[in-house]
Amino acid sequence: MADPARGTTVLNHIGGKELPAASGATVRLIGPATGRQHGTAPRSGPEDVEAACRAAEDAFDGWATTTPAQRQTGLLRIADAVEAAADELADAEVADTGKPRALFLADEMPAIVDVLRYFAGAARNLPGAAAAEYTPGRTSLLRREPVGVCAQITPWNYPLMMAVWKIAPALAAGNTVVLKPSDGTPSTAVLLARLAAGHLPPGVLNVVCGDRGTGRLLVAHPRVRLVAVTGSVRAGQQIAAAAAADLKRLHLELGGNAPVLVHEDADLDDAVEQLSSLAFYNAGQDCTAATRILVHHRIHDVFLDAFADRAARRTPGGPDDAHADFGPLAGAAQLAGVRGLLDRLPDHAEVVAGGLALPVPGYFHQATVVAGVRQEDEIVRSEVFGPVVTIQPFTEEAEAFRMANAVPQGLAASVWTRDHDRAMRASRALRTGIVWVNTHGTTVSEMPHGGVRHSGYGSDLSLTGLLDYTQVKHVML
């Protein structure tokens, strides 16, 4: 539906129907590549959240008692529908995020479809303990059952991918879902629900659009039994506090501040090439982005020069720019946050590449490299979530581990070395949920994605992620 004056009108998807907010309230959708409004979405309130949670609860008993094979069939058909609608989904994602269309189609769409197909298969492979007699005359067995209505809140950096990461394991396990996408990027979530509607009973997958107030209503709703969130550390802390009142289960994938350890025996050219691409991909708006590069002092200067040179050639661009390495920041507030960190750099820090916002419409920023920083600096301890990388020297391996672990977050890290023993020591010493060796940022559906400490708990992807959406029941005969 479209209003010529306001662009595309996105609607909620509740109980199989597409509906505006009961109050008529809307949120303006601003295109990051232009800075202009391109549509509206509902600002859902109590009535909308109640309707969505009621629809999910009404659908739960029927969906929970389907066979794994039936759930597999539904997810496979959704995967086929998503794959067939790639161009339509790209139009919606690009309008909301401004990211380069070619990169979305080449990098994200295949991974999105793969996650749906992976969990379709995983639905039929839940692990369990063998039945046995642990006391005379009694046989014990375990049942894995769905939790119930799951409230899921997804971020704006990868709107469609994060929606699929959340809904696929929840549906595969037999739960029903109420998904709230980020207020500025709801279009692909609603389109996903529309595509899924032909392959799921009404109410199994619902989408309510809105702002933080909508999210608070959803988290607090008494019909919800599990809350899964991908977002900032602050958002996770607030949601955990709110969910505690009703003892809801939580799944939190929160911020990152990934350290990268480059040792003197690393393949320097490969490290520079890979890291200069991965650090700035999606304008650095990635919780696993390679943001803090720690380089052995013997190769620090050479690495810094090469990395800064490569970063200077990483170019931002709009959705239709086939040569763009990354797109704009998500909005005016995100750009202002990045600018604030750079403007507050201490005197001992030096911007050696980039450092400027582009004087064009939209929210574009140069790929930026900062050297001379210290562990206590704000830009080192904070998750920048923008196209900014800091580079620091280290002398000894133990010092590198201390520097890597000296931040509150613990999502991902990478180590670059030809020494197998050193790589294994790093995999043990780095306090993160993911450690890559001589690569960074690669995810696969079969392996868990989650963090420790302020990066949250619970895992997306993998069989571990599927089990997070189940509960165990002991049955004794």
Image (cartoon, rainbow, N blue to C red):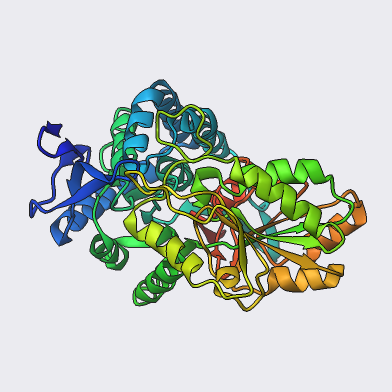
Q: As rendered, which of 122 and 100 lies closer to the eye?
A: 100
Where residue 272 appears, as percent x and y from the top left, is 73, 45
Q: Tell me the residue at 13%/45% (across/down).
A: 20
Q: Residue at x 44, y 34 (%)?
A: 100
Q: Residue 237: horizontal and vertical position, in percent?
A: 43, 73
- Residue 90 appears in which quarter of the rendering? top left
| In the image, residue 398 above or below residue 327 | below
**Furthest-top residue in view?**
84
Quadrant of the rendering where the N terminus is positioned: top left
The answer to whether residue 206 is left or right of residue 475 is: left
From the viewer's perspective, is residue 366 above or below residue 100? below
- Horizontal side of residue 193 vs 45, given as left or right: right
Total of numbered circles in the picture?
0
Position in image of residue 279 (x %, y %): 61, 49
Quadrant housing residue 194:
top left
On the picture, is 444 further left or further right than 332?
A: right
Residue appearing at x 40%, y 53% in the figure: 155
Q: Is residue 143 above or below residue 96?
A: below
Locate the C terminus by quadrant: bottom right
Please tell me which residue lies in front, 147 or 249: 249
The answer, for residue 172, to whether it is visible in the render is yes
User: Can residue 149 be seen by looking at this rendering?
Assistant: no
Q: Position of residue 402 (x, y in %)?
A: 75, 74
Image point 33% across, 50% down: which residue?
181
Choose between 344 and 477: the one closer to the eye.
344
